[in-house]
Amino acid sequence: MAWGKEMHRIIFYDQTDSTNLRLRELADTLESGTVAIAGSQTAGRGRMGRHWLSRKGEGAWFSILLKDTRIDSDNVGGLVFVCALAGAETIRALSGADVRIKWPNDPVVDGKKICGILCESEFEGNTLKYSICGIGINLNGTEFPPELPWATSVRMSTGVTLGTEDVISGFLDRFDHYSETLCSGCISQITDRVRTISATLGQKVRAQNEMTEFVGTAVDLTDDGALIVEADGTRHILRSGEISVRGIMGYA
Ligand code: BT5
């Protein structure tokens, strides 16, 4: 079936634990570009083992397997920006929502998270064996549990009802385009676009990990997507995965 500009083999699960896990289990035998889609996930995963709420009928929950790509191992971290951009632009195009990207890779509307991205890569020595990009887009949910005050859906933020197939198809078109850009080594073209819809740049943010915590102003992205934060006259270059960054007034 052709979803997106490239051919993507699609595997549907009415319900599964996690589409990332399903593709990982089958990675050796499936062809590159295979997409696993779930009606609902019983163990949807976020980064660092966090849970991702993926209820039936409420969103597009899917993962894409990439094998034998020409992505340089140094650039594989750029896949999260490819997905964030594809997610933000798809939701924006189909619903009209003013979707922005909270650094590093959360599409948000009015400061609330509408989409989550989990990219996982497997290496053999220094060689990239495969990557799995998992995307969760909140579409038609009308409320979230109290422990997710910073979550929203397309329906909640715009009143628009979108179908999963249109959303995934629109996503794959953009994903194919931007991942090709990444393969050509042009990650800066992706970060240029992320800059224009960033929810983080220009904001006062709090950066935090086990070693440090400081408040500063997010001033720019480096060409490869690190965040530059100015605090007390010092420029800090923050790399995704090493530190968490939040707005000082809320999530974004
Ligand atoms: C993410 O992690 O945002 C990555 C989410 C990726 C989900 C997709 S769905 C298809 C594929 N299969 C999987 O198993 N996963 C991928 P992170 O940045 O760590 O954010 C996780 C945090 O977001 C949680 O700790 C909650 O606070 C919040 N959260 C959980 N479910 C949410 C939802 N549906 N909408 C918004 N926020 C949510």
Image: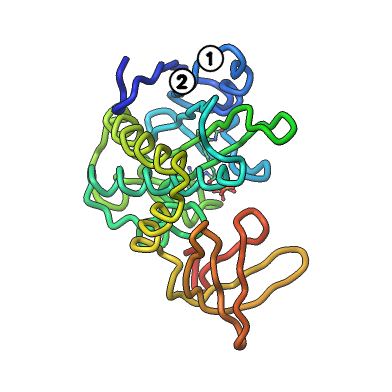
Seen in the picture, residue 247 relative to 23 is either above or below; the reply is below
Amino acid identity at mark 1: Leu
Q: Is mark 1 on a helix, strand or loop?
A: loop
Left or right: residue 61 compared with residue 20? left
Q: Quadrant of residue 86?
A: top left
Residue 42 seen from this side:
no
Dot 1 and dot 2 residues touching (CB under 8 Å):
yes
Residue at left 62%, top 69%? 207
The amino acid marked with disc number 2 is Thr
- The residue to which callout 2 is attached is 34
Query: Relative to 159, does residue 239 appear above or below in the rendering?
Result: below
Residue with the mark numbered 1: 30
x and y percentages locating residue 23 in the rendered image: 56, 22
Q: What's the image's color scheme?
A: rainbow
User: Badge 1, how many Cα within 10 Å: few under 14, some, many 20+?
Assistant: some
Image quarter for residue 244? bottom right
What residue is shown at x 45% (from left), y 67% (from top)?
200
